[in-house]
Image (cartoon, helix red, strand yellow):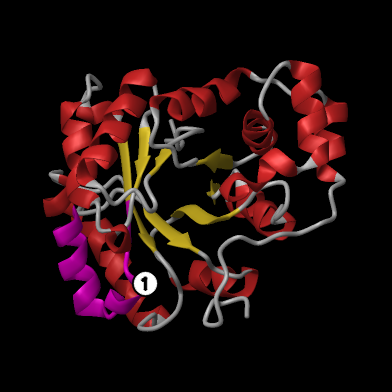
Amino acid sequence: MTETLPDIGIGTYEITDPETCAASVETALNCGYRHVDTAEMYDNEVAVGEGIAAADADRDDVFVSTKIHSRNLGYDDVLEHARGCCDRLGVDSLDLLYVHWPIRTYDPDETLAAFDRLHDEGVIRHVGLSNFTPDLLEDALDRLDAPLFAHQVECHPLLQQAELRSLARERGHTLVAYSPLAKGTVTEVPELVAVADERDATPAQVSLAWLLSKENVAVIPKASSEAHVRENFEARKLDLTDDEVARIDAIEREARQVDFEAAPWN
């Protein structure tokens, strides 16, 4: 059977306090989450590993994802830093390793060849890419020998990423939506507020439920408090109607939350 990514994971971006980070991961896993997402550049892999170790969940049941910093994407650097990620997280191998950004030291030939080698050697079980444009994604897919398991991008009702979601369906990988709550902006989107009021839910839960209604999409909302960790997980139970999904699909406004001059789409 083909392995699939858990539909919801705990995001840890900007949770830099070690105790808070470890506690949020432990809480999430004890609530039922089975996917934990971090990155070299978050500087919290040690704390994430401590949270995983402290949780009641069996390690074999937890899907651990991290990302190589864009300054470390040369061939030898990828090999070295992937093993560093394992050491910091306290794991023997990584379930999923991403190219975090296709910028700075990213070289398609060198970077992707190193990921293929890590996959062949069992250091990583799955290859991921993050923040790739459709053109860059297609180019990487043509170069990789290992199958692409996941592509992680900002995605929410105000940045719906229709083309990248379509590519995920066509090419057989999962689109992992980061910032699925648009850094809290979803609480102010009238279409989401209306559906939330009708369904006795929160706009955040509606945003997550809309994403989870899409084929080949998983979400990794960040949460540090137990209340928000639980609120986000409960979104899995919210089954939106076709009409509700269509109302959100029809939102044409866009508000990208993660953007900078060197980003690959600029």
Please state, as top left, top right, bottom left or bottom right, where the C terminus lies in the image. bottom right
Q: Which residue is depicted at the point 81% across and 19% down?
A: 198
| Total numbered labels | 1
Out of 140 and 241, give the one closest to the viewer: 241
Q: Is residue 201 left or right of residue 44?
A: right
Q: Is 72 within the magenta?
A: yes
In the image, 16 versus 180, the foreground residue is: 16
Q: Quadrant of residue 103?
A: bottom left
**Going by the image, does 21 lie left or right of 148?**
left
Amino acid type shown at disc 1: Leu
User: In percent of the image, x 35 and y 83: which residue is there?
Assistant: 105
The percent position of residue 43, horizontal first and vertical second, equals: 25, 58
Q: Is residue 225 magenta?
A: no
Q: Rate crowding at label 1 as few (under 14), some (14 to 19) or many (20 or more) other CA atoms within 10 Å.
A: many
Quarter placement of the N terminus: top left
Q: Which residues are magenta?
A: 66-85
Q: Residue at image x 60%, y 43%?
A: 181
Residue 135: image location, x then y, percent: 62, 74
Q: Secondary structure at mark 1?
A: helix
Residue closer to the observer: 170 or 102 = 102
The quadrant where residue 167 appears: bottom right
Residue assigned mark 1: 112
Give percent across and percent down for residue 121: 19, 57
State whether the magenta stretch is mostly helix, strand or loop: helix
Q: Residue at x 81, y 23 (%)?
A: 241
Q: Residue 213: horizontal and vertical position, in percent?
A: 69, 32
Q: Is residue 70 above or below residue 147?
A: below
244 to the left or right of 162: right
